[in-house]
Image: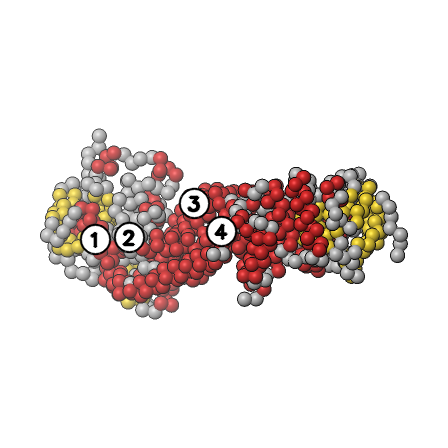
Amino acid sequence: MRKSTLFFTFLAAAVLALGLVLAEARVRMRGELPHLRQEVRVVQTLGLTDLCLATEARHTRHPSQADWHSAFQSHPGALDHFPSGSVLLPPERVLKGYGAPLR
Amino acid sequence: MIELQEVRKVFHAGRPNEQVAVAGVSLTLEAGKLTVFRGPSGSGKTTLLSLIGCMARPTSGRIFLKGREITSLPVRFLTDLRRRTFGFIFQQFHLLAGVSVLENVMLPAYPLGEKYRHLRARALGWLERLGLLSKAGAKAEWLSGGEAQRVAIARALINDPDILIADEPTAHLDTRLSREFMALMADFRAAGTTILIASHDPLVHEAPAVDRVVDLRDGRLLTPEAPG
Amino acid sequence: MGPLFAKQRYLLDFALSCLWRRRGKNLALLTVYTLVVFAVASVMFFTQALKREAALVLGATPELLVQKLTLGRHDLIPADYTHRIREIRGVGQVTGRLWGYYYDPQVRANYTVLAPQGVEVPERTVLVGAGIARVRHLTRGATLTFQGYDGKPYSFQVRGVLSPESELLSADLILMSAADLRRLFGLPEGLYTDLTVAVANPREVSTVAAKIQELYPDTRPIVREEIRRTYEAAFDWRAGILLAVLSGALLAFLIFAWDKAAGLSAEERREIGLLKALGWDTAEVLQLKFWEGAVVSLTAFFLGTVGACLHVFVAPAPLFAPVIKGWSILYPRFRLTPFISLFDLGILFFFTVVPYTVATIVPVWRAASMDPDQVMRS
């Protein structure tokens, strides 16, 4: 068989595969509509403002609600995107719990 | 059929390394004959062949092919003319390593875009005639010297050229293979192909099929042709 | 089949032969190339899908939120702010929201505690998000104990787990009654976390926001449009980090590709000369190189893109999710709704296939225009 035939076959298969994946995605997107509608309902009933993507800090949990300084008051274990945050660990006392006595 | 008028070729013109390769050659070559260009290396044989074969343009002078002036043709036409009219056999064979023998043979025909079936059949036909059919799928670098040259010949013939040009074809062959080569050339000559060979190998210019030997030295003909 | 097509097919045949005879190098190149396309496409699909979903779902958030700021920090807002805000023209209902965070040292996770308006939660009970239920192994009827503001334990019965369907929004939520929330955090009556302000006419939202700001200079009104923009920016930024990490790989690839494409070896130069001597045109040599570049880049594009689709939408992005979602202990399990825009695919195609193909052709240009007799002279 000619090499170009092989390549065309491969290309056709690749286009078909991409087409199938895209078609499947489209079908699935349609199928997700009820799910999206439910999410919209949840947002409405609970009055939510943010996606729960990252919970380690409030400027990542509620980015739309955070003021500019909230990055400094975040989850004690958060790896911060500020350079200092990735170097300075919070005190052990904080990690153990807010109410633990000072030593 | 091929007529050269005062053809000159100068490399690196105007620079310190200027070199006059062909210094005014006027020559008429008949169709269907086997002509050998003889001369020491640097005598301008190869350059003269590349000028005739439309690979390079002369610095001055004119070349006529079948009565048509080719020196002033635009590059596109020149390329087209070259691949339909000439077949080339190079001194080093110049086969592409890593590519099959069949593909090497078909290579010059690719730009012409003919039907694959026809081209393949013709290439296999030539390989069969040259006793290389069993090697069609082999890689070019696996061939012996004689085989490599025959592949180079098949490649030169793939576009059914009117004129076959060979540059020092026997330089890398032993006596037996050189004789075989000249015998093949004799066959093609008998079939009507014009053959031009540059060589300083006595086995070549003493071969019985040779119609004419042109002696060159320092880019000139040793015995200039009488005009007209 | 016209001779033009036949010719290009011959060139493709030969391009494939040429690639195949340097298969070690070319396969390595193809692998790296495919991985780069895969990575870039994955980031693109992932962030696009999140962006679209955020835009769609968060379209239902309150039109306007009002926060109080003290010393540059978010502070509790007094309930009497509602009265004067309600009097602004165009304002509908004004409600105080009660929500905050609770850090659970046991699993080192943050929860969002919320006293919802729209859901009735009996006292001493909570509804928990599916993420918390997973981390703490909670089921309906279990008891959950929090440490209150005063250090004392407060126990709640889990009345139910929120549907995993909405985990993208509610994975870390704890819903409790307003009275419980005030008790747990020691929050006096008359203070809220923030206020939601309903504005019937969307065109009046910014005017209302400006008036609130004028009325209470210590507040920060947040309009819905801002939330949307926040999400656009957040994903761009996170995708940006990821791309920055990837740029190392990208750079390595570029150097590799450049070396491969631009560094025309003496051997390749000789071969191009031979093709010219055999009667090939400059244009045909360039077309041959075009096919070589096109074969490699098309293959990489298709393999990489299909791989990225499978990775992001079928296998829920196991490679990137941790980076994009952050470094949280508790993060939601959710499946992304596959929003793929053909426009994005087109852009990806353009930026992967075209540069490489051009990069393979350009360096050949000079070699391809050499005189055909050079082979004879060598």
- Amino acid carrying mark 4 in the image: Val
Label 3 secondary element: helix
Find out whether the residues at labels 2 and 4 contact each other: C-beta distance under 8 Å: no
Left or right position of B18 against C237:
right
Image vertical order of residue B53 relative to residue B21, above or below: below
**B170 or C258: nearer the viewer:** B170
Residue C77 is situated, as x and y percent measured from the top left of the image, at 27, 53
Separation of residues labelled 2 and 4 (CA atoms): 41 Å
Find out whether the residues at labels 1 and 3 contact each other: C-beta distance under 8 Å: no
Comparing labels 1 and 3, the label whose residue is closer to the camera: 3
* Mark before the other along the chain sequence, 1 or 4: 1
Label 3: which residue? C246
Q: Are marks 2 and 1 on the same chain?
A: no
Residue A24 is situated, as x and y percent measured from the top left of the image, at 33, 62
Disc number placed over residue A52 in the picture, else none: 2
Give the chain letter at badge 4. Answer: C
Residue C210 is situated, as x and y percent measured from the top left of the image, at 38, 60
Separation of residues labelled 3 and 2 (CA atoms): 25 Å
Label 2 secondary element: loop
Image vertical order of residue C350 relative to residue B94, above or below: below
Label 4: which residue? C296
**Pointer 1: residues within 10 angstroms few (<14), some, or many (20+)?**
many
Image vertical order of residue A98 relative to residue B161, above or below: above
Label 1: which residue? C129
**Pointer 2: residues within 10 angstroms few (<14), some, or many (20+)?**
many
The residue located at (33%, 56%) in the rendering is: C313
Q: Are marks 3 and 2 on the same chain?
A: no
Separation of residues labelled 2 and 1 (CA atoms): 10 Å
Give the chain letter at badge 2. Answer: A
**B48 or C27: nearer the viewer:** B48
